[in-house]
Image: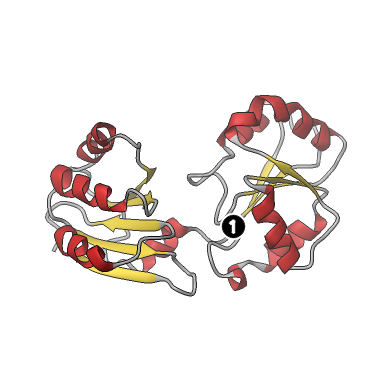
Amino acid sequence: MDEQRTATKLKIVSTPIGNMADITLRAIEELRDADVILSEDTRETDKLLKHFNIAGKENISYRDQNHDRIYPKIVSYLNDNKKVVLVSNSGTPLISDPGFKLGRDLIKDGYDIETIPGPSAVIAALTVSGLPTDKFTFLGFLPRTKGDRRKILKNFGDTEATLVIYESPFRILTLLEDIVSSLGNRQICMINDITKVYEKKWYGNVISLQNQLKNYKLKGEFVLVIAKDQFK
């Protein structure tokens, strides 16, 4: 890696995952000071900025899919000593959200990166799960196909760690079936719309949660925290 080329660095800023009051003072300060904001979805970022009365920012869409096209422009901003911030739609960027390629290439090209930590659904869910948190493995969103999902679950089935998975309302019931088939009827904590007004939590084994969800209107994202094998 080359020596750092500029005093200006990319700031990776965490934002609320549901409750706007969860934003940190430092995150607000960085957003106000930024010249350029790289957003997973500029419309969602505009809502955030409006809520905190922040205006006059160049808000650019950044996703892994457009990385190769937009990366030279980001480097140009940094070379011009502009303050550049990366945010996702909610939570901590790069955690099941865009940003890996950007961080990788900036480090390789000699630029510095700074994190402004804050909300993360993974950590928030673990703290209320009632399951061991000394070791955990985050699997993010599993693949869309049943075979690929079950293969991953089986590969991690024997790990001595709590598993954490994200899922959409459209596949949550299918995922529970996959967990029973691949891991057995394990203890689980499942949270819907974490930190939002209508946050809902379920505790129990997987089959009991399947029964509880039969009459529940499925919407919003889910976080599943799954106990390791033989947990008591």
Residue 200, position as x, y percentages in the image: 37, 71
* Residue on which the image places disc 1: 117
Q: Is residue 206 left or right of residue 219?
A: left
Q: Looking at numbered disc 1 in the image, what kind of residue is underneath it?
A: Pro
Q: State the SS at label 1.
A: loop
Residue 104 in sight from this viewpoint:
no
212, 91: nearer the viewer = 212
Q: In this view, does 207 lie to the left or right of 87?
A: left
Which quarter of the picture shows residue 146? top left
> Which one is in front, 80 or 182?
182
Q: Quadrant of residue 150?
A: top left
Q: Residue 205 at what x, y percent from top left?
A: 16, 62
Above or below residue 121? Residue 150 is above
Taking the image as shown, residue 40 lies to the left or right of residue 173, namely right
Counting from the top left corner in percent of width and height, residue 204 is at: 19, 66
Give percent across and percent down for residue 40: 62, 45
**Relative height, residue 56 to residue 53 (above, below):** above
Give the quarter of the figure containing the N terminus: top right
Is the residue 177 above or below the residue 132 in the image? Answer: above
Quarter of the image that includes the C terminus = bottom left
Foreground pick, 139 / 57: 57
Write the residue at 32% across / 60% down: 133
Q: Which residue is drawn at 45% across and 59% down?
A: 121
Name which residue lies at 11% across and 55% down.
230
Left or right of 181 in this view: 170: right
